[in-house]
Image (spheres, rainbow, N blue to C red):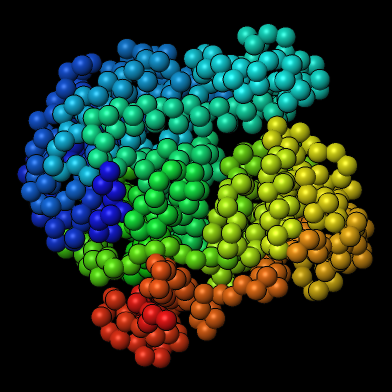
Amino acid sequence: MVMWTDGPLCYGGDYNPEQWPAQVWSEDVALMRQAGVNLVTVGVFAWSRLEPAPGRYTFDWLDQVLDLLHGGGVRVALATPTASPPPWFSLAHPGALPVTADGIRLHHGSRDTYCAATPAYRDAALRITTALADRYAHHPALAGWHVHNEYGTTCHCEHTARAFRRWLTTRHGDLAALNDAWVTSFWSQHYSDWAQISTPRATQYLPNPGHLLDFRRFWSDTLLAAYTEQRDLLRAANPALTITTNYVLGDWVPVDHARWATEVDLVAVDHYPSAVDGGAEEQTALAADLARGWARHAAHRRPGSPPAGGAAAWLLMESAPNQIHTAGRMHTKEPGRMLRHSLAHVARGSHGAMFFQWRAPVGGAERFHSALVPHAGPDSRVFRETVALGAALRQLSEVRGSVEAAVALVVDAASGWALRHPGLPSALPDYHDELAAAHRALWRSGYACDTLTPGDPVDGYRLLVLPALYLIDDDAAEWLRGYVDGGGHLLVTYLSGVADEHARVRLGGYPGALRELLGAYAEEFHPLDAADQVRLDDGGTGRIWAETLRLTGADTVVSYTGGVLDAMPAVTRHRVGAGTAWYVSTRLDDTSYRRLLDTAARAAGVTTVCPDAPEGVEAVRRRDGAASWLFLLNHTDHEQRVPASGVDLLTATPIERAVTLAPGGVAVLREHKG
Ligand code: GLA
């Protein structure tokens, strides 16, 4: 297979020629050439233009577009348009329209109006996929397939309920096991027949946690099956093409991205920070570190050699060239941010930078979402930055390898799902927020950070951080024990290890799965009000959560001070085997969190990427054998000097002692070997 990662860094984005008259296509290709665009996703929502009536295909326009792109040297990731079935489909198959948990059947009028468990939808999706594969699998423009778009919808229809029951029989074997796993002895929920089980629809009061969790797992598997059946068909048509789908990130997403990573040829993620200021950089870094973690997780499980460009290569499949539409308004990116954010992704292993979208449309729901060619046209600041980014990516063509990190966050989708249950001791803890807080603390101090899935190889990591890893099964507990016994350093935060894989609470004191390892356990939780905080004896504060901890071998590092927890341990450290296990029983304020992680990292012998980088300058190193490249990103609005040496690839300038970064500026140094 020819992987995209074997070629130049990918540059381009979603291209929707079906929204434009044919005369615009030639201009598009000319502008793509000017910008250095080399890969576009074509036709991602073009189903009704490709199949205007059942079984009647209109491929002429796509033939022309692909030929034009090929002539212009632009490769194509041809999309299967299955994320937006046409109106005729919904009319013919009303039973394939999705049903919400409240039992409301949604109607056509937006996109994603299908149920992925419904045979009529799956059949229609396979038919259009087959037609595309038959016609284009060997088209010279094709670099690969972009299956669907952002799998992430859910459904509660009868087809789904039937599929859920089938899935449950495979998972649990018999009803006794299911009743045990879901603790149905509570509230008279015992099931005596599979037919009694439905999807977790809206109900009177709190739903069953095991039921909810299994539904999430089932739905991730269902969407994955919808993906893999398209993939298998496309693979059979031409085994040489890269096949992937673009992940949508968010804690609402019912997809276990780590598990999916083993089924895509290249992990591809869409990333839109929630705003352009106030944390966009740290959100970018976390998203990219997660993507690399999923890619590495898959590489460990896949037989054969890792892809060129490193075992952890992935691709930023969508990002915004300019405005980001969140929190009720568009947030405009200031000049330079598109380049800086794109390079933040490339620094962390993305094999390029792709955007939504190529050209801003005149109408449609997302007419004001940003584009590389904005409404103003190519004579615009954004298009000039588009051209500049294309040039920058070409200058970085030699960059290879991956980030080398000695610290890793342990991440698990199911823990995030379980923590969304409304019956937890507090509604305040938010899994993504817990991950982000730990990652932010490491990022601000300048540590390179990987992300791991429980069970992944831990060789080379000196410090593992477990933010709110709520579900820990026996294997994961053993994996952590082995890591610490072998000399690893582990930092665990509250709400980790409280429950087993079925979301059943482990008895004997929290966190049941890690009690012995931590040499401490919590007898009681003390969740806090949103406005409250607890004081700590090192001057720091905690919020959201606190605990009554009892020590069974650990030392107190920081204590609560004042209130009912006065003088009780808040942060503990346990030396066990050849390693150390830390426990943090509250959500530390950012400064304290950073200080604690710094202490733990230093104790573990971990150093930052670029110890002399000033605050606000992000430093990321990619390494391939003896060669290394240092990315320096100045996120401040003033000039910064960073001690470093090498050759700045963006300006082809040798750097002897220090590089000067303009406000918001970037440099990528090929470092001297040795
Ligand atoms: C997602 C989708 C795109 C588009 C963008 C808008 O990432 O995949 O189709 O809707 O968001 O920001």
Give the residue displayed 41% in from the left and 69% down from the top: 625
Which residue sits at x=65%, y=48%? Answer: 430
| Residue drawn at (10%, 55%) of the image | 30
Q: Is residue 465 visible?
A: yes
Q: Is residue 406 left or right of residue 269?
A: right
**Relative height, residue 124 to residue 326 (above, below):** above
Q: What x and y, as percent, mark residue 300?
A: 49, 48
Q: Where in the figure is residue 626, as x and y percent of width and height?
A: 40, 73
Quarter residue 532 falls in: bottom right
In the rendered image, which quarter is residue 590 located in? bottom right
Quarter of the image with the C terminus is bottom left
Which quadrant holds residue 60? Answer: top left
Relative to 256, does residue 596 appear above or below in the rendering?
below
Q: Where does the N terminus fall, quadrant-wise?
A: top left
Number of numbered tags placed on the structure image:
0
| In the displayed structure image, the side of residue 4 where residue 448 appears, left or right | right
* Coordinates of residue 388 in the picture (x, y in percent): 24, 68
Q: Residue furthest bottom?
A: 657
Q: In the figure, 253 relative to 343: above or below? A: above
Q: Nearer the viewer, residue 144 or 208?
A: 144
Q: Could you tell me which residue is drawn at 61 percent across and 52 percent down?
A: 410
Q: Residue 538, percent across and down? A: 81, 74
The answer to whether one can see residue 584 in this image is no
Q: Is residue 9 left or right of residue 168?
A: left
